């Protein structure tokens, strides 16, 4: 009877020790890190709009391969790529098209032609409005028409330009809405450039004056629609070009487009505006490495817990045997007495 009682007590002790193993504390891992990295250069940038953005008029320009010329878009793609780490996976696209008006850009957006570029864009830089105004004005620069005819054309053109401005004022907010509706990135920022004036110092005063008035009105629309930067950021390209048309454009050759110096200046202006903003990229490589290391820690912890349980179970078994043995010895001693 005494033996049976000791055995029961010993088994109870062993069971208690075994049960205790289920309460061994498991390591609490630190909170998962945030792998969203903030940077000032956009990991994915898209340039769109007209021939100013495409690089028309530059050496080596090819409308079918815009990467060959030193356009401000190409300059900035190299700058931003060099500033970002490999983990940012920098992407760049220039979908500007020669001759595109604000109405043309709006239609392309509505037709979904830009969707694949806009979906994950961090920044979109738009140059639009040049062909709404400069295109018609450029028609006054033909070499083979006389002064009288040029002035007559300028007078008749003024009302047409006002119509273009009214249409631009309607198109611009819709362009902004279309771009925003096609971007899925929460940190997306839209930039719209003002239009420089290549004709401000033109030899024919009526043309120069008209260009100042109409291009000034277009830039006022760009600033106004931005709603103090709430809808988009305005990149002030017009100001650094002021008074430097002959230095920064091909106007001496009756071409209103920026030359290489002009593109370099636009690149600097756009870069300054873009890098004032903050963008984010997800560091996939760091996230994957974290998961690998976390899994390794889990496995090590699991193995450690298993070893503890084996030690405790072995100890509980030994304790039970010792207790039974001690009980038996005690009983025999009592009997001898």
Image (cartoon, rainbow, N blue to C red):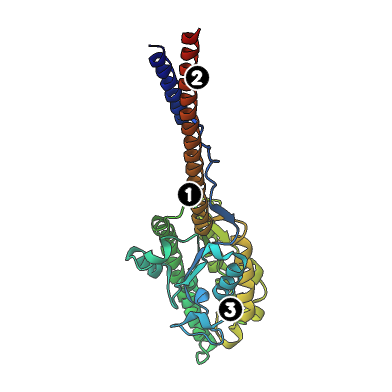
Q: Position of residue 235 (x, y in %)?
A: 58, 62
Image depth: mark 1 or mark 3 in front: 1
For image coordinates 54% across by 46% down, the residue present is 33
* Mark 2 secondary-structure assignment: helix
Q: Earlier in the sequence, mark 2 or mark 3?
A: 3
Q: Earlier in the sequence, mark 1 or mark 3?
A: 3
The residue under label 1 is 295
Structural crowding at the residue carrying mark 2, measured as other residues with C-alpha within 10 Å and reported as few (<14), some (14–19) or many (≥20):
few
* Mark 1 secondary-structure assignment: helix
336 or 59: which is nearer to us? 336
Q: Position of residue 248 (x, y in %)?
A: 64, 78
- Depicted 189 relative to depicted 133: above or below: above
96 or 206: which is nearer to us? 96
- Depicted 4 relative to depicted 207: above or below: above
Query: What distance separates the C-alpha of mark 2 from that of mark 3?
Result: 102 Å
Q: Which mark is residue 326?
A: 2
For image coordinates 43% across by 83% down, the residue present is 64
């Amino acid at each position: 009877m005494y033996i049976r009682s000791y055995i029961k007590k010993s088994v109870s002790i062993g069971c208690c020790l075994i049960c205790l193993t289920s309460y061994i504390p498991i390591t609490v891992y630190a909170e998962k890190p945030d792998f969203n990295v903030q940077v000032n250069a956009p990991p994915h940038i898209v340039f769109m709009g007209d021939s100013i953005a495409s690089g028309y008029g530059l050496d080596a320009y090819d409308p079918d391969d815009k990467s060959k010329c030193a356009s401000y878009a190409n300059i900035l793609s190299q700058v931003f790529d060099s500033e970002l780490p490999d983990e940012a996976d920098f992407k760049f696209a220039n979908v500007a098209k020669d001759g595109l008006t604000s109405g043309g850009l709006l239609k392309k957006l509505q037709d979904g032609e830009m969707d694949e570029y806009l979906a994950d864009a961090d920044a979109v830089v738009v140059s639009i409005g040049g062909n709404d105004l400069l295109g018609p004005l450029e028609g006054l620069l033909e070499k083979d028409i006389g002064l009288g005819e040029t002035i007559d054309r300028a007078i008749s053109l003024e009302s047409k330009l006002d119509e273009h401005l009214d249409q631009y004022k309607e198109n611009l907010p819709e362009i902004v809405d279309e771009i925003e509706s096609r971007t899925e990135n929460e940190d997306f920022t839209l930039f719209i450039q003002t239009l420089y004036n290549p004709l401000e110092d033109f030899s024919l005063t009526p043309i120069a004056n008209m260009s100042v008035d109409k291009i000034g009105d277009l830039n006022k629309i760009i600033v106004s629609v931005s709603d103090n930067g709430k809808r988009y950021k305005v990149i002030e390209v017009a100001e650094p070009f002021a008074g430097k048309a002959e230095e920064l454009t091909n106007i001496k050759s009756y071409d209103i487009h920026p030359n290489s110096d002009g593109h370099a200046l636009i690149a600097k202006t756009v870069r300054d505006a873009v890098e004032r903003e903050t963008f984010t990229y997800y560091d996939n490589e760091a996230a994957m490495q974290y998961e690998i290391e976390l899994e390794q820690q889990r496995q090590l912890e699991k193995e450690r817990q298993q070893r503890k349980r084996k030690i405790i179970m072995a100890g509980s078994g030994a304790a039970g045997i010792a207790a039974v043995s001690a009980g038996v010895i005690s009983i025999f001693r009592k009997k001898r007495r």
